[in-house]
């Protein structure tokens, strides 16, 4: 796949990117961390420098915003499906959406 003139997956954007390795949850047995990953390998961190826990984000920010907006009680994960549906409706290729 070519994106902005570069073939995807062939060249990291920076040396730092190359050092991060592949910590995608889909390739780590569903545990969300790559084998041998260190706390400094996190892409997004909490204010204390540790891992961000979804339950804290949902309870402290997402659910109050949903309620304030007067929307039905949905899961954060449901937004993934909404985004995919909107992209497909806009004519984005299913290969890109998946």
Image (cartoon, helix red, strand yellow):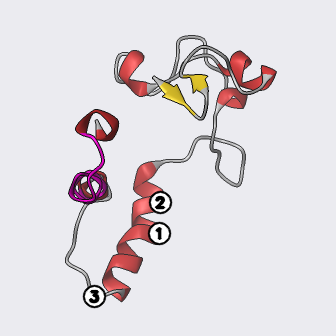
| Mark 1 element type | helix
Front position among marks 2 and 3: 3
The secondary structure making up most of the magenta span is: helix
Residues at badges 2 and 3 in contact (C-beta under 8 Å)?
no
**Which residue carries the number 2 mark?**
57
Circle nearer the N terminus (3, 1) = 1
Residue drawn at x 61%, y 24% is: 6
**Which residue carries the number 3 mark?**
70
> What stretch of residues is rendered in magenta?
82-93
Q: Nearer the viewer, residue 72 or 84?
A: 84
Q: Is residue 32 above or below residue 67?
A: above
- CA–CA distance between discs 2 and 3? 19 Å
Location of residue 66 by image quarter: bottom left
- Which label belongs to residue 60? 1
Residues at badges 2 and 1 in contact (C-beta under 8 Å)?
yes
Say few, some or many: other residues with alpha carbon within 10 Å of mark 3 (under 14 / 14 to 19 / 20 or more): few
Residue drawn at x 31%, y 56% is: 83
Residue 23: x %, y % from top left: 53, 22
């Amino acid at each position: 796949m070519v994106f902005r003139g570069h073939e995807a997956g062939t060249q990291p954007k920076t040396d730092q990117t190359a050092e991060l390795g592949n910590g995608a949850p889909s390739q780590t047995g569903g545990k969300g961390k790559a084998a041998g990953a260190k706390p400094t390998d996190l892409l997004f961190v909490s204010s204390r420098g540790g891992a961000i826990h979804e339950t804290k984000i949902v309870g402290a920010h997402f659910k109050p915003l949903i309620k304030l907006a007067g929307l039905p009680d949905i899961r954060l994960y449901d937004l993934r499906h909404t985004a995919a549906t909107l992209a497909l409706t806009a004519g984005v290729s299913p290969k890109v959406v998946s």
